[in-house]
Image (cartoon, grey):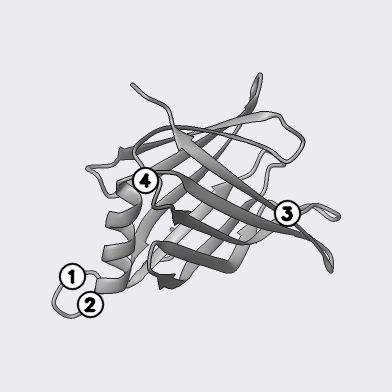
Amino acid sequence: MGRMTSATAAGKVAPAGAAAFEQLKALVGEWRGRRPDGGEIGVTYRLSACDSVLVETWNLGPGRESLTVYHIDGTDLMATHFCPQGNQPRLRMARAAGSRLDFTFCDATGVRPGQAVQRHFWIESGPDGTITRSETYFRGDEAESETITYERVAR
C-alpha cells in the first residue's frame, strides 16, 4: 500500500496546509495563458473526492495533457504531477507567502534515464484576477524554467 501519515493529534490539518489548500480551491474553473513561444496553453481546476483533492488538468495540445493533483497528507500540502513524459514527481509545499505557494521536490516514480523531472514550482494569484505559475525541470544538473500568467475564462 501507499505511504500513509496520520493527521495531527486533534484530527485536523495544520493551519498552513489547510489555508493553502483553501487558497487553491478558489482556482476552480478554466484558465488560458500564452507560452513564451506564443502558443496558447489551457489549464482547468476541479475538485474531486468529496472536495479533498484539487485536480489541475493541462491541455498541452491535441491529444496531449498532464495532471497535477493537490491533497493534504497529514500536515503537508502535496502535489503529484503526472507528466506527459510518463514520470510522476511528488512535491511538498515548502512556503506560503501571501498569495504565493512554493512547492519543492520530494521524490518521483517512473523516471527513465535522461528525462527531465519537475523539481520546483510556484503558483501565485495576482491582484488583477490572474494567476502566474512557474515550473522548474531538471535533466541531470541542468535546470529549465518556464513562467506563464493565466487569465480566467469567462463562463
Distance Cα–Cα, label 4 vs label 1 = 18 Å
Quadrant occupied by the N terminus? bottom left
For image coordinates 77% across by 36% down, the residue present is 37
Q: Pointer 3 and pointer 2: residues touching (CB < 8 Å)?
A: no
Is residue 46 visible in the rendered structure shown here?
yes
* Earlier residue among tags 4 and 1: 1
For image coordinates 38% across by 68% down, the residue present is 98
Quadrant occupied by the C terminus? top left
- Looking at the image, is mark 4 or mark 1 nearer the viewer? 4
- Looking at the image, is mark 3 or mark 1 nearer the viewer? 1
User: How many numbered marks have been drawn onto this rendered protein structure?
Assistant: 4
Amino acid under disc 2: Thr
* Earlier residue among tags 3 and 4: 4
Query: Could you say which disc has been placed on residue 12 in the image?
Result: 1
The residue labelled by disc 3 is 111
Query: Could you say which disc has been placed on residue 54 in the image?
Result: 4
Distance Cα–Cα, label 1 vs label 2 = 6 Å
